[in-house]
Amino acid sequence: MKLFKKIPNPREIRQNLGLNQLEFWSKVGVTQSGGSRYESGREMPKAVRELVRLMHIDRIDLTKVKREDLIVAAMLKAQHPDLYKSLKKSAKVST
């Protein structure tokens, strides 16, 4: 999925997940009233769109991602690109 891609209907995503506005928007650091404005058509900043994509579409729990994990992934990609590609391919197949 392309980073910062437009999210056409955040309300529909929220409703499909069975979350109220507070539950949905607080996970990405947005107030309920701010989320309500985005659901009514106000433009979402790129950072908010990306957080919504990661948390609610890709279902990545960002509270569990550690800085060290990102560093290890970057090192693996730089130092062992073939292994990185193989692991990435395996991860896609298993999800």
Image (tube, rainbow, N blue to C red):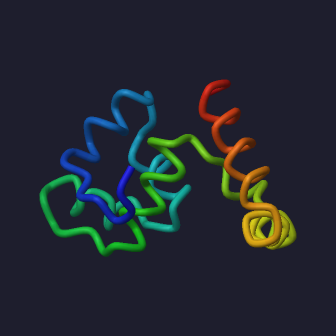
Q: Which residue is located at x 51 percent, y 61 percent?
A: 28
List the single residue furthest toward the front.
82
Q: Which residue is located at x 67 percent, y 49 percent?
A: 85
Q: Quadrant of residue 68?
A: bottom right
Q: Is residue 45 above or below residue 40?
A: below
Q: Nearer the viewer, residue 94 or 77?
A: 77
Quadrant containing the C terminus is top right
Report the number of numbered marks.
0
Q: Is residue 27 above or below residue 20?
A: below
Q: Is residue 34 left or right of residue 92?
A: left
- x, y percent for residue 62: 67, 57
Q: Is residue 28 left or right of residue 73?
A: left
- x, y percent for residue 17: 44, 30
- x, y percent for residue 79: 82, 70
Q: Is residue 23 above or below residue 5?
A: above
Q: Is residue 89 left or right of residue 15?
A: right
Q: Which residue is located at x 39 percent, y 47 percent?
A: 21
Q: Quadrant of residue 63?
A: bottom right
Q: Is residue 4 above or below residue 23?
A: below
Q: Which residue is located at x 43 percent, y 55 percent?
A: 52
Q: Quadrant of residue 43?
A: bottom left
